[in-house]
Amino acid sequence: MGRLFGTDGVRGVAGIDLTAQLAMDLAVAAVPVLVPAAARSHDAVRPVAVIGRDSRASGDFLEAAVVAGLASSGMDVLRLGVIPTPGVAHLTRALNADFGVVLSASHNPAADNGIKFFGRGGVKLADEAEDAIEAALLAGRGQQARPDTGQAAPAGFGRVTDAYSANETYLDHLLATLQTSPAGHAPLQGLRVVVDCAHGAAYSIGPRALRRAGAEVIAIGAAPDGDNINAGIGSTHLETLAAAVIEHGADAGLAFDGDADRCLAVDGDGQPLDGDQILTVLASHIKRTGQLAGDAVVVTVMSNLGFHDAMRDAGIGVIETPVGDKHVYAAMRDGGYVLGGEQSGHIIQLGYATTGDGVLTGLHLLAAINSAGIPVSAAAKLMTRYPQVLVNVRGDKDRAMADPTVAEAAAAAQARLGDAGRVLLRPSGTEPVIRVMVEARYSELAEETAGRLAEVVRLAMS
C-alpha cells in the first residue's frame, strides 16, 4: 500500500477508492492522533470536531460515515454543511474545536471526493501527523480482523449537532477584514462583478460576500445539483467567466474552484489574471499601506519570472518554496510574512486566514483595485508575464533525475536563456512524470527550449 495521503488529503473516486468504510476508519484513526489522551479522558467536556463539505452528491454518505466514526470515538461533532474549505479552517479556530474535517476534491470532477483534516487552530496537518493517522488506520483495521482481541468499548459517545448558522460567522469574518473608504463608502462600491462559483462550496457565500461589500453582482455557477461541480465552469474554465463578463459589461470577474480555496480573475475585456498577477496587485497595495511584513512575499518555484521582475521593481523581496500551499504557509509562519501563494490562485493572507481562501482573495483584490481608482486591466499590467511552457514527460522519473545528461542539458538551456529566462525540472509528487518548465521573453524560444529538454529527459527514461 502506498502513502494514503496525497498533497492535499486523501482523494479518489467516491464509492470506489474513497468508500464509506474508509471514511469512517480514517475518522476513528484521526482522533487519537489529533486529540491528546487527556482531553479524551476528561469526564466533563468532550472534545469537538467540525465538519464541512462541498456540493458533491457523495458528500452526504461520506459525511455520515465520518460523523459516525468521530461520534463513536467520543467526539462531539458540529456539522457545518456546504461551506468553503477555508471556512472550515476558520471555524475550527473560531469555535475552539480540536480539529476540522473537510470533504472535498477541490477542482476535480464530481465523481471524485476527498477527506482532509485541519489541526487545532485551523492549520493543515504536517506530514508526520498524516503518517500517524495512516499508521493508526492500519493498526485499527488489523484489530478489526481479530474480533477476539478483547478491546474495551469506548467510555462514551459524542453528540452530533447541526451548526449551519456558523457559516454566518465565517461570512462576517470575511467582511470584517475589509476597510471602508475614507469617504465612508463600501469597499467595492461602484463595481459590477461576475462571480463564478463552480457550482461548488461558495455558491451562496461568494455572491453574498461581494454584495455586502458593495458590489453589483452577477452570479454564475451558483446552482449546484450534486453532479455539476466544476463542469465546464469555475477557475479551471475561465472562458465561461470571460464570456459572462463581456456579456454583462462587468468591470471584472472572479472564479472559484469547487471548494473555494483558490481564486482567479478576469478583467473587463475577459483577459485572465492568474495567481502571480493577483499577488502582484495585493503585494503592491499592502506595501503602500505599510503592512507588508518583511517587505517580502512567499511563492513557489513555479511563479512566473515576470512576477520576480515586478517585485524587484516594487522593492519587494521574494521567498521561494517547493510546490504546494502547505510549504508556502510554513515559510510564511516561520518567517513572519503575511502574504504568499501560487499561480493556481491559492493565496494566503496570514493576518486573516491560515490557508488559501478564494472569497477572501477576491474581496481584497477588488478592494485594492477600487481604492486605487484604476480598471482591473491596468492593475494586471503591474506584472508582465513571461511566456511559460510546461511539458510533462512520463516514465521513470528517478532514473531521469539521476542521469547526468539531464542535469547537463538543463544547465546548458539555462545558460542560453541567461537572465531572460528560466528552466525548471520537477518530478511530480503523485505521478511517474517529470515536469519540464521553461520561461523566456519570447514564446517561440520557450517552446523550442522546452521541447529539446523534454526529449533529453525522455531518452534518459528509456
Image (cartoon, rainbow, N blue to C red):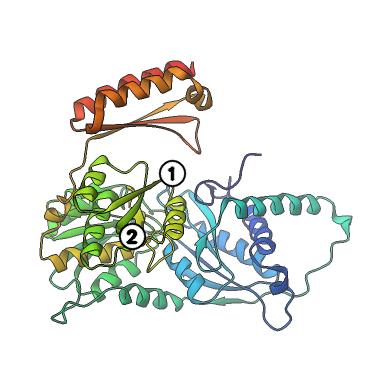
Residue closest to the eye, 332 or 76: 332
* Quarter of the figure with the N terminus: top right
- Residue 287 x, y percent position in the rendering: 24, 62
Q: Which residue is mark 1?
A: 322
Q: Is residue 166 above or below residue 383?
A: below
Residue at 32 percent across and 54 percent down: it is 297
- Counting residues from the start of the chain, the first of labels 2 and 1 encountered is 2
Q: Is residue 166 above or below residue 29?
A: below
Q: Amino acid at mark 1?
A: Pro
Does 186 sit left or right of 30 as displayed? left
Secondary structure at badge 1 equals loop
Other-residue count near label 2 (Cα within 10 Å), few / some / many at <14 / 14–19 / ≥20: few
Residue at 44 percent across and 62 percent down: it is 85
Residue closest to the eye, 334 or 122: 334
Other-residue count near label 1 (Cα within 10 Å), few / some / many at <14 / 14–19 / ≥20: few
Residue closest to the eye, 429 or 409: 409
Q: Quadrant of residue 16?
A: top right
Q: Which residue is mark 2?
A: 294
Does 157 sit left or right of 393 as displayed? right
- Residue 324 x, y percent position in the rendering: 44, 48
Residue at 33 percent across and 21 percent down: it is 412
Q: Amino acid at mark 2?
A: Gly
Does 169 sit left or right of 359 as displayed? right
Residue 82 visible in the snapshot: no
Residue at 50 percent across and 62 percent down: it is 123
Residue 121 visible in the snapshot: yes
Secondary structure at badge 2 equals helix
